[in-house]
Amino acid sequence: MRPATSVSDVMRVPPSIGPTPRKTPFVVIYDGECRFCGGFKAWVEGRVSSDRLRFVPCRSRERALEFPEVRESECLEAVVIVRPDKSIRVGADALAELASLLPGWGWFGSMMRVEIVRRFARNAYRWFAPRRHLVSCGYGVCQFSAPWFEPRRFRRWGEMAAAALLVAGLAGHYSFVLLHLLPKNPVTIFYGDVVDGYVRPFFVQNWHLFAPTPPLTKQSIHIQLALRPKNKGEVALSEWIDITSPLVRRLWRNRLSPAVTRQRTIEGVVGDYANLLIRWKQSPESKLPLNHAARRYRFLLAAIAGNLYSEESFELLAVRARLLHESAPPISELGKVNPDEELRSLVLPWATPLGAGLPPEFGEASLETSDSGSMR
Amino acid sequence: MIIYCLRSLRVMLARRSHNRTGAALARVGFGLWLASYYLQSFSILDFIWGEHGPFPHAEFLQMLERTGGHSLLTFSASPVMLNAMWTLGLSASICLIFGIKPRFAALTSAVLLWSFHERNPTILDGGDNLGRIVLMFMIPMCTAAHLSLRRAVSGREISRMRNMIHNAALLAVTFQFCMLYGASGLAKANGSLWQNGTAIYYVLMNDVYAHPFLGPLFSKHFLAITIASYATIALQVSFPFLVWSNRWRIASILGLISMHIGIGYLMGLVRFSLVMSSGLAMLLPDEFYRGIFRAARRLFAAPELPFTAAAR
């Protein structure tokens, strides 16, 4: 029996009741002469504790004694990981194993285990491993160095390629935009979907800007309210109330006032509904988003009408709008006492503020179905 | 030949970032344009984008479903959400004006502007259409070199790759303006009223687009109307060609900026003119702004007093 030589020997306790033995670490066998591998080792060591991971150079006595099953030629060709259960992972698989040990890199390890990624990674590793000597790392920076590599030349060609790519991208983009802006032509007839698919929704554009014909008429919008007194009197129709002129006056007092957006909203919604109704009248079979336009018309009129009568005294039954188009006198008649001016009026259907059916005295027109909308 | 072209292209794009002063001016102009958009809507938020107008949330969702559009305002019908988006939009526009994190501000502005445009498309004009496209190109540009509280890049050279991206975006904006004026000019040239030089008369007869005092006055001057109509077509049609010429670029752009100032004043389309002029200001070279700055300094320099010279 060996005599006790130190305190620790004397105090030695049986393993079953002492502290848990240290876990066997993963062992990475790497090419110690490769500067890229050395840089990579330093990077990994900074992220994982030494009792989890141990690095052993390939050409070392330690490797030969501890891991004789890993041949030198093998570990010079690809990195090898010996797991605690003595199973071995090589190359890209070893990197996947290593990634799952690094905090924050587990996702990379899991991704590398997906079959298609694993195949790609193995091939990429096989391509890179013999070329790893061309990359040298030190002080956290890796550089590519090969006898045939001239950084300035590469940068020049890289910049030329990037410039060519950018310009080609712009040329492609604006070819689509140009086709989108051009009138119908053979390309847009046959490939209209492709052009539209590219341009919509982010690059849709329309640059008519008062062309080919500027607005030839002054348009004003009037609304009329059908009210019933709360004391159950007769239904009364209000006068036509001009809602455009006060807005236009306010808009000219201050061109950045809210009147601008308010006027555009009113004109847009009423004009859209009127145009759709006219088109629908011309061809009742055509599929037009008339119901949507009618709903917006109803919401708009309900919002405007709310400020025009006293809710305490009246109940709002219905409301409708009228578009008044006053054509400008031709330039040849300017200065005449009675210039030749035309006035056209377009009365749109009644709309009920809450979307309820119209009372019988307003006719059969119901905005929800809109198909029976009347125009005068 | 191809190699020669590629080399020239590389030199043009990578050596330095062009028009940095113009880009900074455009950034400020776009910031003002966006701020005016949000402030103009403040008192009627509920009418134009909220539940008490023609586009309540349910209607808006149906509209997007039909058009296939996208908007951040789809997430909630709550007025809190609307107010939060409005505040964010206004803050981003203020950041653009002062050049605080301009790239992030441009990105945020582009996304929010898009969302608000989708919410109510009836209030938009050509300026809004151009603004949201150019804003996308402004994201990668270097716009903080001047007129910026945080002059992040003015003191040092920026990398060649950043130069390339900036210049490519600038090129994209130039192409965009070529498309705009080319399409608009050709459409005007096809219109009979533009051909006979009376189009501007009819525009000025519309009380929405005519200055209440100057509109009727100007519409009686037939010579001025005819010249203005033809000059508009000439300026717009020629722009896609002249903008590539070093000799004519400045004249063409200044002509168009003057036209937009006229539109802003006479027709009252202030926001439209602001965004168009800001975009055009981006296309003017740095040398032009340096020249103006030097001329202004000479003009406003304190005159040297005779006795100071004698005393020396």
Image (cartoon, grey):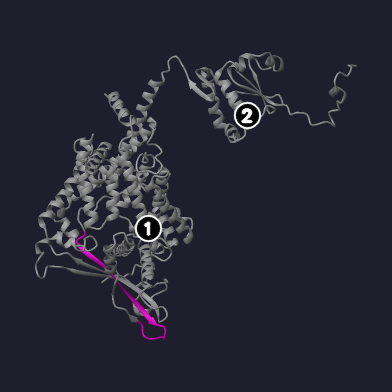
Q: Which mark is residue A106?
A: none
- Provide residue A237's location: percent of width, then percent of height: 32, 79
Q: Residue at x 18, y 65 (%)?
A: A327
Residue A140 lies in what quarter of the image? top right
Which range is magenta?
A215-235
The residue under label 2 is A97
Q: Quadrant of the N terminus of chain B?
A: top left
Q: Secondary structure at mark 2?
A: helix
Q: Main secondary structure of the magenta part?
A: strand
* Residue A314 drawn above or below residue A121: below
Chain letter for mark 1 = B
In the orientation shown, which residue stands out farthest toward the right? A1
The residue under label 1 is B39
Q: CA distance from mark 2 to mark 1?
A: 57 Å
Relative to A243, A158 lies left or right: right
The three-letter code of the residue at mark 2 reads Glu
Residue B208 lies in what quarter of the image? bottom left
Residue A22 lies in what quarter of the image? top right
